[in-house]
Image: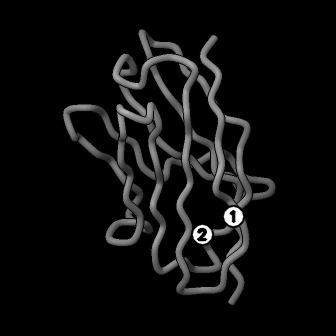
Amino acid sequence: QVQLVESGGGEVQSGGSLTLSCTPSGPLRNFDVVGWYRQTAGTQRDLVVITNHAGVTNAAESVKGRFTISLDDSMNTFYLQMNNLKPEDTGVYYCNVEQWGYTSWGQGTQVTVSS
């Protein structure tokens, strides 16, 4: 079972920026896909952005041009840079990794954007 440790959530005003980080217990380069999902109260966990080491990325339309996912193998960590945040970006953000068909989740970190 892969353990994921997230950090970087918080509260920011509309238009601000935050960076989330996620560190897996295993080597980052071993995972097929890594990414971020968001969940708000009473809703399912929705994709924000996912990527792989080949640089293939899939992002939700609502975050394109504002959110960037990046991988740092030297730090064994991947990040979600969020710029120009909007109130509708509010939610609990979960990092996710996939390997050999298995999925692991971080503990979640709250992001709150006030207007």
Indicate whether 2 appears above or below 93.
above
Place of residue 85 in the rendered image (x, y in percent of width and height, measured from the top left)? 54, 77
* Separation of marks 1 and 2 at Cα, in angstroms: 8 Å
Q: How crowded is mark 2: few (under 14 residues within 10 Å), some or many (20 or more)?
A: many
Residue 89 numbered tag:
2
Applied colour scheme: one colour
Q: What is the quadrant of residue 64 in the picture?
A: bottom left
Earlier-in-chain disc, 1 versus 2: 2
Indicate whether 4 appears above or below 99.
below
Residue 27 numbered tag:
none
View extreme (left): residue: 54
Place of residue 16 in the rendered image (x, y in percent of width and height, measured from the top left)? 55, 82
Mark 1 or 2, which is nearer the eye?
1
Residue at position x 57%, y 20% in the image: 25
Indicate whether 61 appears above or below 69.
below
Q: Name the residue under label 1.
A: 111
Image quadrant holding the N terminus, namely top right
Q: What is the quadrant of residue 50 in the picture?
A: top left
Which type of secondary structure does the marked residue at label 1 adopt?
strand
71 horizontally vs 108: left or right: left
Query: Looking at the picture, which amino acid does disc 1 mark?
Result: Val
View extreme (front): residue: 74
Residue at position x 45%, y 41% in the image: 78
Place of residue 42 in the rendered image (x, y in percent of width and height, measured from the top left)? 80, 54
